[in-house]
Image (cartoon, rainbow, N blue to C red):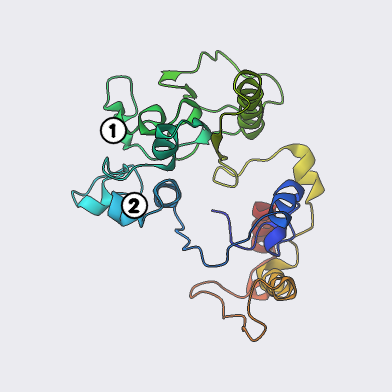
Amino acid sequence: DLGFSDFGCYGGEIDTPNIDRLAAGGLRFTGYTTVPMCTPARAALLTGKNPHSVGCGWLTHNDPGYPGYRGEMSKDAPTMAELLRAQGWSTLAAGKWHNTYDRNLHAGGDTGSWPLQRGFDRFYGFMGAETNYHQPDRMMEGNQLAPVDSYPEGYFAPDDYTGRAIGWLAEHRASAPAKPFFLYLAFQTPHTPLQAKPADLAKYRGRFDAGWDALRATRFERQRAMGLIEPNAQLPPRNPGVPAWDELPAEQRALFARYME
């Protein structure tokens, strides 16, 4: 649910300083085939293959019987974690998984597509499509439910994943500093239910009031200045069914701006 231009390093107005710093010292790709759904996008990223070819052309909640839409990554399509672990890497995953058929998300189900069985040494997070950011449901620690009775005041799941990942890396560096590692840190942000900390909501209050027409034009010009698009590229029209921002009733403009915040 993240747009190509949402990050600061791709022209967005959202503050992403750490990602921007990584991008400044690395490579920014402009030809990645975006798969605008959770399961297929993750399957493509983890296997390097077209998601339909590995059984993940759709989400994990149904299996219509066609091989391209089973909801789990095919066993004959190794994940990055499986390949790297076989070469002696440590492999770590935190956050959202969403690459296991929903019918198998219980203790008696087929766990062959769970993170530890698909190449990861450690996993901490949730297995399904979405969960509450402040009171997440059925958090997993490896192949078991995490032993959590309650969450403290101010708990925020993305911070929990970050803290867990940092702890893993500290342990890794202390015990085997020369061993390479692969960390798959898959935040649920910005997926529904679209929850954020009060301080962040306050920080972004009003930033999107100009609406999607003005913001996309500004992002486009910023991308052109950054060299991410060709100088002669033209901004395409809005997608069919998307109204002009100025034609929306005031209450809808306020609602959609709040969604972005």
Residue hosting label 1 = 103
Q: Nearer the viewer, residue 163 or 182?
A: 182
Q: Residues within 10 Å of mark 2 (few under 14, many from 20)?
A: many
Helix, strand or loop for disc 2: loop
Q: Residues within 10 Å of mark 1 (few under 14, many from 20)?
A: few
Q: Is residue 165 left or right of residue 214?
A: left
Within the image, what quadrant is residue 206 found in? bottom right
Within the image, what quadrant is residue 30 found in? bottom right
Q: Nearer the viewer, residue 253 or 168?
A: 168
Q: Is residue 59 left or right of residue 176?
A: left
Q: Nearer the viewer, residue 57 or 207?
A: 57
Specify the amino acid type for callout 2.
Answer: Trp
Residue 165 - label: none
Q: Position of residue 124 (x, y in %)?
A: 52, 26
Q: How many marks?
A: 2
Between discs 1 and 2, the one toward the N terminus: 2
Q: Residue at x 33, y 35 (%)?
A: 102
Specify the amino acid type for callout 1.
Answer: Arg
Q: Is residue 176 above or below residue 162?
A: above
Residue hosting label 2 = 58
Instruction: Specify the farthest residue to the front.
Output: 178
Helix, strand or loop for disc 1: helix
Instruction: Specify the farthest residue to the left.
Output: 65
Q: Residue at x 54, y 71 (%)?
A: 242
Q: Residue at x 67, y 73 (%)?
A: 213
Mark 1 and mark 2: span between their CA atoms? 15 Å
Asked if the residue at tag 2 contacts the one at tag 1, i.e. Cβ–Cβ closer than 8 Å, the answer is no
